[in-house]
Image (cartoon, rainbow, N blue to C red):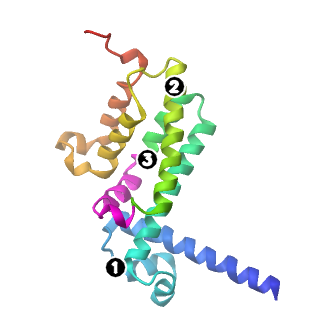
Amino acid sequence: MVHLESYVRADARRNLGKIVAAAAEVVAERGVNAPMEAIAKRAGVGVGTLYRRFPDRDALIAAVGDHYIHTMAQALDTASRTSADAWSAIWDFVSWAAAPGRAALSTALAVLPEEVIVERAEFARIRDEWVAQLAELVRRAQAEGSMRPDVGVDDLLHLLNVFTCHPDKLPAPVAADPGRYLRLMLDGMKASAATPAGA
């Protein structure tokens, strides 16, 4: 009986994970008002199963927001562990976060009122943790001499916000090739690109 209950719980967790991952994909493609039926179909579950897990759209979208911020935290952790140095970790993480598929999800979620996702306790906790980790990478990169000293973590957050959450605010040439302009802006944060004080 214990083994059966454990299996059922594990299967339920897998189904939950499939639903949230599928919802993230569909929301990135079709926006936060994507049909619940489309999400259920992508997840390979019935609509009834979807509604048993999430009684309404707001509950599902909140779960997608938590999924998104956890994924960001995991990506930053991976970049921190696998990159050659702090600057490389920053570059890898920002480039990953601004990739078209992930940026589409950020853009879709950005239209929601802050209380739906951003102000939720779980989202805020994880976001604070990865922002602190990103700030530590900035300090390390500056100590290593690879990042200009007048750049802070807020500058990186503003950069990510523009390129991932509000691409509609970008000039048309930038929106047509955001990766190129993101790289140019990151290059401007290198220590070698710093403008001398008073220039």
**Percent position (x, y) of residue 39?**
42, 77
Residue wearing tag 3: 97
Judging from the image, what secondary structure is the residue with disc 1 in?
loop
Q: Which residues are magenta?
A: 98-117
Mark 3: amino acid? Ala
Badge 2 crowding class, 10 Å Cα cut-off, few under 14, some 14 to 19, many 20 or more, is many
Our reading of the magenta stretch's main secondary structure is: helix
The residue that appears at 58% across and 38% down in the rendered structure is 80
Residue marked by disc 2: 141
Tell me which amino acid carries mark 1. Pro
- Mark 3 and mark 1 lie on one chain; the one further toward the N terminus is 1
Q: Nearer the viewer, residue 121 or 27?
A: 121
66 to 188, vertically: above or below:
below
Which residue: 81% across, 84% down?
A: 2
Tell whether position 100 is magenta: yes
Quarter of the figure with residue 109: bottom left
Front disc: 2 or 3: 2
- Using residue 96 as the reference point, say whether residue 57 is left or right of it: left
Q: CA distance from mark 2 to mark 3?
A: 19 Å
Asked whether 173 or 27 is in front, the reply is 27
> What is the secondary structure assignment of the residue under circle 2?
helix
- 12 relative to 197, above or below: below
Mark 2 or 3, nearer chain start: 3
- How many residues crowd mark 1 within 10 Å: few (<14), some (14–19), many (20+)? some
Residue 185 belongs to the span the image colors magenta: no
Amino acid carrying mark 2 in the image: Ala
